[in-house]
Image (cartoon, rainbow, N blue to C red):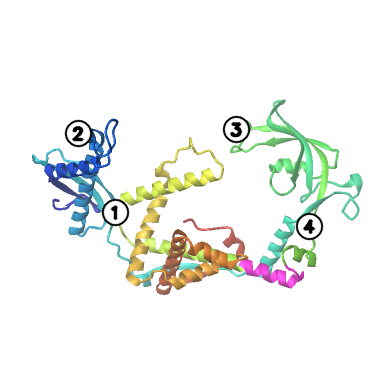
Amino acid sequence: MATAVETLGKLERRLTISFPVADVRTEVEKRLKQQAKTARAPGFRPGKVPLKMVAAQYGYQIETDVLNDKVGRAFNDAAVANELRVAGFPKIEPKQDAEEGTLAFDATFEIYPDVTIGDLAAVEVETVATEVTDAEIDKTIDILRKQRVHYHTKGEAGEHGTGGDAVAANGDRVTVDFVGTLDGVEFEGGKAENYPFVLGEGRMLPEFEAATVGLKVGESKTFPLAFPEDYHGKDVAGKTAEFTITLKNLEWAHMPEVDAEFAKSLGIEDGSIEKMREDIKVNLEREVTARVKARNKEAVMDALVKSTELDVPNVMIEQDSERLAEMTRQDMAQRGMDVSKLPFPTEMFKDKAERRVRLGLILSQLVADNNLQATQEQVKAQIEDFSQSYEDPKEVLKYYFSDRRRLGEVEALVLEENVVNYVLGKAKVSTKTIAFDELMGSMPQA
């Protein structure tokens, strides 16, 4: 039996579960006899072990299982009888003042909150839009050219400067020897021979690059270099060292021309520049569409969080914090990091977990109230859309439809999209056009 539900807080509840000790003993004896049918012990045939020996070996575990089963069943029955929507798992503690011949337990738990969605017509949502222009296509082509760059010794025929007159400039690949000292003493990591880098890429500190610019092969220069306070090398961070560099080799960057051969290297069989630009535009537009959709989804989620008041069960926040901590641990381990000694306090993830849980409750209510569940047709269409960027779309379809978990991930995406479209259809929506670079340089956090 269970007592009436006590209200301890906005979402916290408690009830007392009790049942006769005799009921537990009866069930324990029943399970012991069942266990005895297959029990084994030295000197006895299977199933012939004395009940006292079976009880000695298995009694504690069986009694624990019986208590867990009875408490769990009694709690579930009480939750159903009282129409309680229990969040997470209850905390079960034995009561010390139970009546003689009775076992009693206090079950403390939280319930799901009532979620009331505000008037969506009053919600303001700012969405973004971005256009792919010829300028973005040109930038992408330049990036592709840089990825295919090759280098020639500077000063060779056909290049600016000849022989020993060639000097290092931004964009050149230089090879240098260098040595750094602090108060006249060399320090660890401050010396290298035949060290290559490209001027202007920011790989070296600005003072180092500035000292290299203008040098000819064989020339040396000594200069002071102030390390930033937050420099990764703690021994030199915030200190000023003296460096001497010697230019050993100088090469200029030769990027391929935008011609038929370049187009063919990108998979355009007939070498058509026009076809190459069209393919690049299609790919850019696909990426823009995905990022715009993500930005707009985040704007809708922010609006829903701001417009919906509800209390979030602490137990759900704790569970999601633990889940996020474990996901982070696994991700870092997969990247090759040793996480065995790294702490992952769940408190670090509490704010993110609270938002995720809050949004989950809001979305569930919106979906239930407005029948926004993902349909099979929508899921299939989404997977077909995924498959367009792969060589064999049929394999992509097979990949998703062969695994229920993968299908579930797609269903969740479609469901979120249904919610976003529903809210945008009701809310006060304004659209802001942003530059391509701004869109590509920022992504919302989940």
User: Considering the numbered disc 2 on the image, is that residue within a helix, a strand or a loop?
Assistant: helix
Name the mark nearer the viewer: 3 or 1. Answer: 1
Label 4, on which residue? Answer: 255
Q: Is residue 418 magenta?
A: no
Contact? badges 2 and 4 (CB < 8 Å):
no
> Picture coordinates of residue 357 (x, y %)?
37, 55
- Is tag 2's residue or tag 1's residue first in the polypeptide sequence? 2
The answer to whether 247 is drawn above or below residue 118 in the figure is: above
CA gap, disc 4 to disc 3?
A: 39 Å
Q: Taken as a whole, is the magenta stretch helix, strand or loop?
A: helix
Q: Is residue 434 visible?
A: no
The answer to whether 263 is drawn above or below residue 112 in the figure is: below
Label 1, on which residue? Answer: 87
Amino acid type, residue under disc 3 in the picture: Lys
User: Considering the numbered disc 4 on the image, is that residue within a helix, a strand or a loop?
Assistant: loop
CA gap, disc 2 to disc 1?
A: 42 Å
> Picture coordinates of residue 42 (x, y %)?
29, 31
Amino acid type, residue under disc 1 in the picture: Ala
CA gap, disc 3 to disc 2?
A: 68 Å
User: What segment is highlighted magenta in the picture?
Assistant: 268-284
Label 3, on which residue? Answer: 234
